[in-house]
Image (cartoon, rainbow, N blue to C red):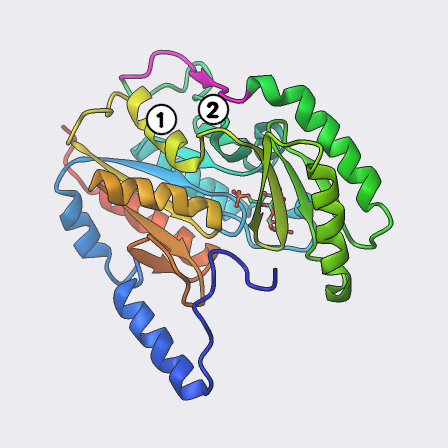
Amino acid sequence: MRASSPTHLKSLPSSISSQHQLNSWIMQHPSALEMFDRIIEASGGKQIVMFLDYDGTLSPIVDDPDKAFMSSKMRRTVKKLAKCFPTAIVTGRCIDKLYNFVKLAELYYAGSHGMDIIGPAKGFSRHKRVKQSLLYQPANDYLPMIDEVHKQLLEKTKSTPGVKVENHKFCASVHFRCVDEKKWSELVLQVRSVLKKFPTLKLTQGRKVFEIRPMIEWDKGKALEFLLESLGFGNSNNVFPVYIGDDRTDEDAFKMLRGRGEGFGILVSKFPKDTDASYSLQDPSEVMDFLRRLVEWKQMQPRM
Ligand SMILES: O=P(O)(O)OC[C@H]1O[C@H](O[C@H]2O[C@H](CO)[C@@H](O)[C@H](O)[C@H]2O)[C@H](O)[C@@H](O)[C@@H]1O
């Protein structure tokens, strides 16, 4: 539970070895800012499509999930990005909560870990192949079950100080960032005892959070694939998807891109972690710098 996700590489005994480990990880996952020119070269004139995680990627990680605000600079950057490339936010949060933070109608949103997908609001479908807002909810049948499990998790964990339980429509979260470490094992037992009654739900772990999701074959990688298809790039080799994320659930999207052999993932992390991403950025401020460079580069391209 201690490691934030994806899993930190095993710590080595001395700080010299740790430095060595960090250096060799950076060699394998170089900074996307430093490799910017090479990334643009690799895109080879194909249509870049941007996928962005929210927490820890566009907003810094904070103790209270209801206060994970996005800076206005970041919002302006994402707005400009969406003018240049089709842009989606793919998140564990439900779309309503996410939209309250982001407030940009021109984006694609894949909420609840990709189980709730919507397209840009009417009048914002500037990427020509999309004519209307799309909508896909593969876990619709689970709505009442998520409400029920959320209710039971609230009740079961209410004696644990610092815990926060969220209902994200098609999934639920139990946060332990503010729970005393000595109480973590007790909390695991509480969550598991509720989940015993819901055999069609699965439990995964993110950054100091348990995520409770329907046991269906759907994740952020599948959502990415769905969005590419909806944009008309399902069987196209003329697309270059870029996915930026910091959490374990983002690994499904990184893996999907590796499998497709097109585009790549960027892991947001200051520490070496096991990942299928090709590049790294240290924190949301580096993410913003990278997005700005993409916008500047695009604006300098001759119009076709
Ligand atoms: O897919 P994401 O957009 O990364 O969503 C994953 C979880 O994000 C939120 O929790 C995380 O951010 C919080 C605010 O910074 C932080 O307090 C928490 O510890 C992190 O795990 C969200 O609240 C969760 O429901 C999402 O599952």
Task: Answer above or below: position of 217 versus 271.
Answer: above
Q: Residues within 10 Å of mark 1 (few under 14, many from 20)?
A: many
Magenta range is 129-139
195 part of magenta stretch? no
135 part of magenta stretch? yes
The residue beneath circle 1 is 227
Q: Is residue 186 visible?
A: yes
Question: At 70% across and 54% down in the image, what residue appears?
Answer: 176
Question: For numbered disc 1, what is the local secondary structure?
Answer: helix
Determine the residue located farthest toward the top in the rendered image: 131
**Count of numbered circles on the image:** 2
Magenta-colored segment: predominant secondary structure: loop
Q: Earlier in the sequence, mark 2 or mark 1?
A: 2
The residue beneath circle 2 is 117
Could you tell me the amino acid type at mark 2? Ile
Where is residue 112 shown, x and y percent of the image?
55, 32
Where is residue 40 shown, x and y percent of the image?
19, 48
Where is residue 242 shown, x and y percent of the image?
30, 43
Question: At 47% across and 85% down in the image, what residue appears?
Answer: 13
